[in-house]
Image: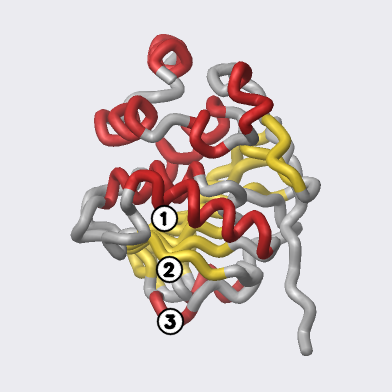
Amino acid sequence: MGRLANDLIKNGYLRSDAIIDAFFNIHRIEFIPEDLAAQAEANIPLPIGYGQTISQPLTVAFMLELLDPKQGHNILDAGSGSGWTTGLLAYIVGEQGRVTSLEIIKELCEIGKKNVNKFGFVKKGIAEFYCESAEKGFKKNAPYDRILVSASADEIPLALKKQLVIGGKMVIPIMNGIWYIEKRGEDDFHIEKFPGFVFVPFVKGIDN
């Protein structure tokens, strides 16, 4: 991951010390199928099965820099796939923080949990995995300092807006762009939009 991380630093996508440190220590190769290992440092999205992909490292770096995660934060990682973003975030928040990972595809959820626990984050209680839709967030562990969403939605889910602390930040793909949301008051949200990104669609749960 060293060469790729260095390229992302050189091109200005990785800037924060904590995020750079996470990229150097939580290698993408641990979160992709073994037959794709040779492409782990390629700056491209890769298939992880079940019609899903692990995002392009440039995109992950861009989103995490917007998110601005800190040590001790309580973070929701919605649509965590094979677990790379959860692993990066767990490394950053440390033992005083918590990352709640939501993934609706059960097989991927279990794969992600296994991948993240290669670093001991599940065992230490830093990362928790729940195999369910992120459409309604996860009220049990709310409110969150940060919310990261890795699948494209048509609009910002109301539950996620409610579960963000005042002063908290959310990064979410909407249509073909990445939106940065900062909650400045109970009903006051500052939004910045960055076009030109493509994500797999947000998968909604089925009401029983």
- On screen, 193 above or below 128? above
Query: Which residue is pictured at 74% across the width and 41% down the height?
Result: 176
**Label 1: which residue?**
169
Residue 207 position within the rendered picture, expressed as x and y whole percent measured from the top left: 77, 85
- Tell me how far mark 1 sits from mark 3, CA to CA: 19 Å
Tell me, for residue 140, which label it has, or none.
Answer: 3
Tell whether 14 sits left or right of 36: left
| The C terminus, quarter of image | bottom right
Q: Are marks 2 and 3 in contact (CB under 8 Å)?
A: no
Query: SS at mark 2?
Result: strand
Lateral position of residue 191 relative to residue 144, left or right: right
User: Which residue is label 2 attached to?
Assistant: 164
Q: Nearer the viewer, mark 1 or mark 3?
A: 3
Q: Quadrant of residue 193?
A: top right
Looking at the image, which is closer to me, 79 or 149?
A: 79
Using a 10 Å C-alpha cutoff, classify the residue at mark 3 as few (fewer than 14 neighbours), some (14 to 19) or many (20 or more).
few
Quadrant of residue 3 in the image?
top left
Q: Earlier in the sequence, mark 1 or mark 3?
A: 3
Residue visible at 39% across and 24% down? 14
